Amino acid sequence: MRPTQREWEYGIDFLTRTGHMCDDKRQEFILLSDALGVSMLVDAINHPVSEGATETTVLGPFFVQAAPEKEIGDNISGGMEGKPMLVTGSVSTVDDKPLAGAVVDVWHSDDDGYYDVQQLDKVGDLTMRARFRTDQNGRFHFWSIKPAPYPIPHDGPVGEMLDAQGRHPWRPAHVHFMISAPGYEQ
């Protein structure tokens, strides 16, 4: 590469503006890392997986370490309004043997695209998240409400970059899972 003086100055200005967007509630550099794919690259490099294993991914900003323990089949919506959603799943080894007692952390947004931690004044407590343990067949299921797609913050340099690339800021509706069991990679 042979950047021009003007390109270099724009790059410095972009990084300076990115830094100015950061405060105790917003980290524009992590958002930039995510939008560029660097966060996933670092995760993939540092968490290689065996053939047949589920790939890891970045944790994201809305994970809570102390999610409430729930029973299989419970409703984790906390009474939030929305379209009912049944989630079923199973956890197995790479040899396809059921993994009983695995811890399955789940969390997702509401039907407006907000997580509980973004609106504790409205919801009052942690909701739309839980920690389950798989049954003897490695299975789990729970009820909640269907999450909504939502945009990442796009009012700063990262949004400008997405616009320049012809990309949108929207994340699809999704449910997060983090699974752990003794003797296995989280």
Image (tube, rainbow, N blue to C red):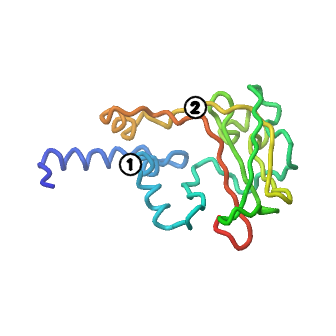
Q: Position of residue 4 (x, y in %)?
A: 11, 48
For residue 81, side relative to residue 12 (left or right): right
Q: Position of residue 48 (x, y in %)?
A: 51, 67
In the picture of the structure, the residue carrying the numbered disc 1 is: 36
| Position above or below: 97 against 89 | below
Circle 1 Cα neighbour tier, 10 Å, few/some/many (<14 / 14–19 / ≥20): some
In the picture of the structure, the residue carrying the numbered disc 2 is: 149
| Position above or below: 116 against 133 | above
| Position above or below: 30 against 148 | below
Circle 2 Cα neighbour tier, 10 Å, few/some/many (<14 / 14–19 / ≥20): some
Q: At label 2, which amino acid type do we have?
A: Pro
- In this view, the residue in front, 38 or 102, is 102
Q: Are marks 2 and 1 in contact (CB under 8 Å)?
A: no
**Label 2 SS:** loop
Q: Position of residue 121 (x, y in %)?
A: 73, 35
Q: Quadrant of the C terminus?
A: bottom right
Q: Residue at the location (69% across, 52% down)?
A: 64
| Mark before the other along the chain sequence, 2 or 1 | 1
Q: Position of residue 138 (x, y in %)?
A: 79, 57
